[in-house]
């Protein structure tokens, strides 16, 4: 079944980390399908406003939701504010950071930062959103962005991989909790996608070596991930829950 135009009209979606990269593309894709999109950002309000303009141009409505997902109290208040003022049908847990390093040199405080944002942030936002998602019933969607690294591991990314793997377990557990109300919970695991984060952590020589391992022989675009999220958010995916959708060009099968 093809994705229907404006299938999300009347729905409010909150996208964490929506100011740039994959998050920005997700906001645009949801807006193009008619959703009102709450764009979460931490420090870059200017970038969030740029995303809002793109959402409006795509045909959706946009609003800003500034809070740090790594701060449990702030995340809970931020999600509740969106839900109280606009309702909340779709939560996309996308915000994440990467701090890399070999285990023997990795700082405990860096571990705490990665886990706080990438894993605890998903817990905090999901918990705060639960009453609104359950009220939305069959329109309710919880979509978590994990990573191919969470499934396959990667040297030098122990903290990141642990957090992203934890998201998968959380996704499957919540899918079982929410199923009786018709709310679906799924995860998307992107492979290597062209973003600022990828550019920062993937030097040119490593990029060329990586391409040789990807069957589709290209780095993914943010829109590849965004379109997958938009599908899971829509009515066409109403019978899909507890699943992990791999968007990685065949890197992991």
Image (cartoon, rainbow, N blue to C red):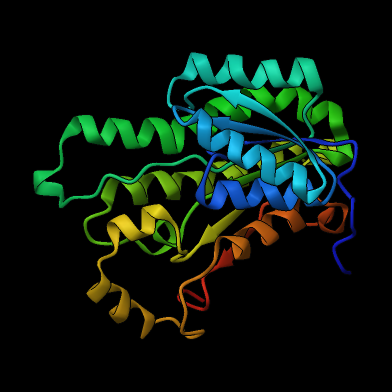
Question: Is 232 on the left or on the right of 192, as rendered?
Answer: right
x and y, in percent, of residue 237 in the image: 81, 57
The residue positioned farthest toward the left in the image shown? 104
Q: Is residue 224 above or below residue 116?
A: below
x and y, in percent, of residue 170 in the image: 55, 41
Q: Name which quarter of the figure residue 212 lies in.
A: bottom left
x and y, in percent, of residue 2 in the image: 87, 68
The one of 114 and 123 positioned closer to us in this rendering: 114
Question: Is 215 on the left or on the right of 10, as rendered?
Answer: left
Give me the residue at 76% from left, 58% from top: 231
Give me the residue at 54% from left, 25% from top: 124
Q: Is residue 241 visible?
A: no
The one of 41 and 142 positioned closer to us in this rendering: 41
x and y, in percent, of residue 224 in the image: 61, 66
Instruction: State how many labels appear.
Output: 0
Q: Is residue 209 above or below residue 48?
A: below
Q: Is residue 9 visible?
A: yes
Q: Name which quarter of the figure residue 53 lies in.
A: top right
Question: Is 10 on the left or on the right of 26, as rendered?
Answer: right
Give me the residue at 68% from left, 61% from top: 228
Q: Is residue 209 above or below residue 107?
A: below
Q: Is residue 214 above or below residue 66?
A: below
Position of the N terminus, as image quadrant, is: bottom right
Question: Is 87 on the left or on the right of 220, as rendered?
Answer: right
Give me the residue at 60% from left, 18% from top: 78
């Amino acid at each position: 079944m093809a994705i229907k135009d404006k299938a999300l009209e009347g729905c409010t979606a909150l996208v964490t980390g929506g100011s740039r990269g994959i998050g920005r593309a997700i906001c645009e894709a949801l807006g193009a399908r008619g959703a009102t999109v709450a764009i979460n950002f931490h420090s870059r309000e200017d970038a969030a406003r740029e995303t809002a303009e793109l959402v409006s141009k795509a045909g959706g409505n946009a609003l800003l939701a500034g809070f740090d997902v790594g701060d449990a109290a702030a995340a809970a208040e931020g999600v509740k504010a969106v839900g109280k003022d606009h309702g909340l049908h779709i939560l996309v847990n996308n915000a994440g950071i990467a701090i890399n390093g070999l285990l023997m040199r990795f700082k405990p405080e860096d571990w705490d930062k990665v886990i706080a944002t990438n894993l605890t942030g998903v817990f905090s936002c999901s918990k705060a959103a639960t009453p609104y998602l359950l009220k939305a019933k069959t329109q309710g969607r919880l979509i978590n962005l994990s990573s191919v690294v969470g499934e396959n591991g990667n040297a030098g990314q122990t903290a990141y991989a642990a957090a992203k793997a934890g998201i998968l377990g959380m996704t499957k557990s919540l899918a079982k909790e929410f199923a009786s109300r018709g709310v679906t919970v799924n995860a998307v695991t992107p492979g290597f996608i062209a973003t600022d984060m990828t550019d920062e952590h993937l030097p040119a020589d490593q990029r060329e070596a990586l391409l040789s391992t990807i069957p589709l022989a290209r780095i993914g675009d943010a829109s590849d991930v965004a379109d997958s999220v938009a599908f899971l958010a829509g009515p066409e995916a109403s019978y899909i829950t507890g699943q992990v959708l791999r968007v990685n060009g065949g890197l992991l099968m």
